[in-house]
Image: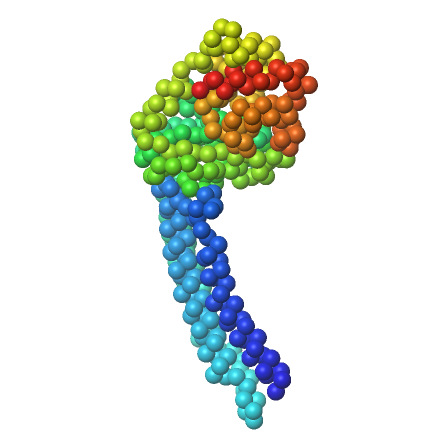
Amino acid sequence: MTAHRNGTRWLRLTALLLVLLPIVFLAGCTLQQYPQSSLNPQADYARQIQGILELQTIWVVIIFALVQGLLIVAVVKFRNRPGAPEPKPVHGNTMLEIAWTIAPAIILTMVAIPTVLTIFKTQENPPPNALNVTVVGHQWWWEFRYPSQNIVTASEMVVPVGKPVRMTIKTADVLHSFWFPAMGGKRDAIGNRENHMWFTPDSIGEFPGQCAELCGTSHANMRMKIRVVPPAEYDAWVAAQQAPPMTPEEGSIEAQGLAIYRTSACIACHTIQGISPGAIGPNLTHVGSRETLAGGMFVNTPDEMEAWIKNAPGRKPGAKMLSLDAMKLKPEQVKPIVAYLQSLK
Ligand code: CUA
């Protein structure tokens, strides 16, 4: 009798958990708190994926309710009663066995058809008016090149709302994976081939992204963002990025910074158009216009930039950016350099 009562208690507890768990799960899904959620589609590609997820969730819930319902009916109806006879053993039931082979096959087909259709749809060629952007993964930051506009920038991608964007995905070193959850699925950046994907962002806003393939020490610090802006704002951004870098006023701290920059080791790794040709680190021609530093790790303020230049390896594990000593810079030379770089809007 005690065992029977215990069994009932466990059954009740399990039933309660089954009801409560999904509620807890749903409560955890507040999207405002987690902007990098893949349940926050802001482009056609991401919406197609979301559509499949919703469709399959509905089926899963129906199947779950059916199976659990039948289970509960069986447990209650055929439970052990005092004085009840031993149940008759059953051996094989051809009809049942055929049914429970065919039913999963039908369910899997229903899952497969929309999935495969969506895969084909997202592999189609982009419309001819698409904006071409090449993204290059580096340890540990993303480079964005706009070949038709002759723009090279880092960590932040700017696109006009409503225009298809065709990404060409490459890497400069190891494997990375390009992923803006709000835009669509992941695509690997592979050494000996170019990968492609395209999407049409449909809402204005800033959406974070992240490298999604373990690529070394600072994999988790390989962040990026996409800024989806109205077309006029995009045109203004393009014009600003195409302009030559600002020339500092003679005698200013920025001019002092430029003079130090020219003689530093910075020029071996960074491009500033017309000033230094380095191509290992991010292009700095308009670094002052960016919102973040160091692969999206820090907000681009003069203080953060100073701290970053003074101790890059200490602030970002494994960073390829050299230490102050290795760059042959004195601590007091950093402030003028920061003033110069910040002026490059
Ligand atoms: Cu690049 Cu992980």
| Residue drawn at (51%, 38%) of the image | 210
Nearer-the-camera pick, 311 or 193: 311
Name the image quarter holding the C terminus. Answer: top left
Most extreme residue toward the right, as rendered? 325
Return the x and y of residue 109 as percentages of the image width and height: 41, 58
Query: Where residue 173 sits in the image (x, y, percent)?
Result: 58, 28
Residue at 42% from the left image edge and 58% from the top image edge: 57
The residue positioned farthest toward the top in the image shown: 250
Query: 115 or 209: nearer the eye?
Result: 209
Image position, residue 245 (x, y; %) = 45, 14
Please indicate, yes or no, whether residue 327 appears anywhere in the rendered image.
Answer: no
Q: Quadrant of residue 307?
A: top right
Q: Position of residue 309 (x, y in %)?
A: 60, 23
Residue nearest the observer in this picture, 213 or 248: 248
Looking at the image, residue 186 sits to the left or right of residue 335; the answer is left
Residue at 31 percent of width and 26 percent of height: 232
At 41% from the left and 53% from the top, the residue drawn is: 53
